[in-house]
Image (cartoon, rainbow, N blue to C red):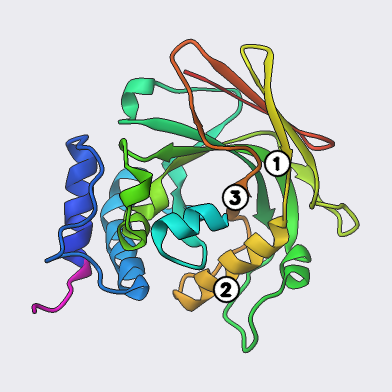
Amino acid sequence: MSQFDPRVAAAFIAEAHRTRSPYQNLPPEIAPPTIADAYAAQEALCELWTAIYGPVRGLKIATTTKVMQQLMGIDHPCGGMIYERRIHQSPARLRREDFVNLMVEFELAVRVGTDLPKQNQPYTAADVRAAVAEVMPAFELIEDRHADYKNTKATTLIADNAWNGGVVLGPAVRAPGDMELNGIRGSLTVNGEPRGEGRTDGPMDALAWVANLAADRGRPLQAGMIVITGSVLPTIPIAPGETFVFTLEGIGSVELSV
């Protein structure tokens, strides 16, 4: 069996995106055999994509629910990168044709105000809460390229940057230490009509997980970076002519149209 080469896996994924090909798991002969290898492939993809999308300015967490983890055959979340040119400000109008299959998630985003370097002990939720400078409502743009979620392998998902296609950020507000970030009510309207609501659930646990993953990977979170902390509502598509407005109570709203 040939040795795994993350650059080969990354080149396959980059070409699939360039040609707008439907998602497929990486072929066995080039697929990462381990989760660590999958992140190595994601790093190799980053080397290719920074020339197109700019430097990494944020990170994401994916597969936070037990249902999604069971589908992927894992027992932990996954992480991905957010590139500078894929960060949009609200109100954003995007072209549906720029995506193979655009899906949307509804998130609390945080901007860290201090560096979070590698340390002897893993970061806790309390540690990272002290580093949060600002919070904002956000849409995550999911580019799943019509993936069959039931047959998606976690290693390919990770190598494919956890399907992040960018974010739309609402106005930021300061987040003093006594501001409660868990249990914030989030609501969605589509063309002005209520479509659903939920609440933030453990966003600082998510941020701690991302901070530890980033430090372990040798690209720790730095002051000014954005982290999206998991969707408050189920992932849904957005159709041409639709306008989504997602509101986090006490924080603000973010708007996206296609």
- Find out whether the residues at labels 3 and 2 contact each other: C-beta distance under 8 Å: no
Residue sitting nearer the eye, 128 or 102: 102
What are the residue bounds of the magenta stretch? 1-6
How far apart are labels 3 and 2 at the CA level?
A: 15 Å
Is 94 positioned to the left or the right of 1 in the image?
right
Q: In the image, is residue 177 above or below residue 23? A: below
Residue assigned mark 3: 228
Residue assigned mark 2: 212
The residue lying at 44 percent from left, 23 percent from top is: 94
Front disc: 1 or 3: 3
Q: Earlier in the sequence, mark 1 or mark 3?
A: 1
Residue furthest to the left: 1
Q: Position of residue 181 (x, y in %)?
A: 80, 51
How far apart are labels 1 and 3 at the CA level?
A: 9 Å
The residue lying at 61 percent from left, 84 percent from top is: 119
How far apart are labels 1 and 2 at the CA level?
A: 22 Å
Residue assigned mark 1: 136
Q: Residue 153 is drawn in which quadrant?
A: bottom left
How busy is the neighbourhood of tag 1: few (under 14 within 10 Å), some, or many (20 plus)?
many
